[in-house]
Amino acid sequence: MLNQLKVVFAVALVAIVSGCAGIIKAPASMDSEAKQFKNDPAVAQVYVYRNESLGAAISMPVAVNGKLAGSTGANSFFKFDLAPGKHTISSQGDESELDIIVKANELYFVWQEVKMGVFSGGSELQQVDAKEGMDGVSECTMIKSKF
């Protein structure tokens, strides 16, 4: 039993140490500009945010249309400028997927809710209204996207 506890502890420690690797904050000016929530007539702006402390040590990959954008950490967000039409936002591989149809000159908000499992965390993506989304994003720090 003691050996099993040591293994579980070791796995948890590795997850904590490596969990936030690869999360790079965007410059403060980009963060501030994104939080002004100004519409752009050329594109739809989609915010994906994670404003929870639950699972803080775990980074969660986010992809747009199958292309990895990066990983969120606790209290962080991405902002994507997307062409009008249908897009798929996914998290943790394809564990959570959300299809969203967007229009130019509109803002969209997707909350990445953390779901804790026995050995690792997961997430569920949910589209939320503008008020909830703006409040959530305002609590977070923008991270750079590879997208």
Image: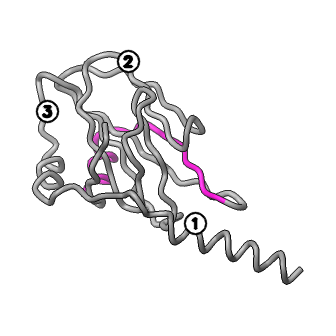
Circle number at residue 86: 2
Of badges 1 and 3, nearer the viewer stands 1
Circle number at residue 39: 3
The colour scheme used here is one colour
Quarter placement of the N terminus:
bottom right
As for residue 126 lying within the magenta part, the answer is yes
| Residue 29 percent across, percent down from the top left | 10, 56
Q: Is residue 38 left or right of residue 69?
A: left
| Residue 24 percent across, percent down from the top left | 30, 58
Q: Earlier in the sequence, mark 2 or mark 1?
A: 1
Q: Quadrant of residue 64?
A: top left
Q: Quadrant of residue 51?
A: bottom left
Q: Is residue 1 left or right of residue 56?
A: right
As for residue 55 lying within the magenta part, the answer is no
Name the residue type under label 1: Ala
Determine the CA span between mark 2 and mark 1.
Answer: 34 Å
Q: Nearer the viewer, residue 7 or 139?
A: 7
Determine the CA span between mark 2 and mark 3.
Answer: 18 Å
Determine crowd level at label 2: few under 14, some 14-19, many 20+ residues with C-alpha closer than 10 A: few
Residue bearing mark 1: 15
Q: Which residues are magenta?
A: 120-138
Determine the CA span between mark 1 and mark 3.
Answer: 38 Å
Compared with residue 140, is residue 66 higher up or lower down, i.e. above or below?
above
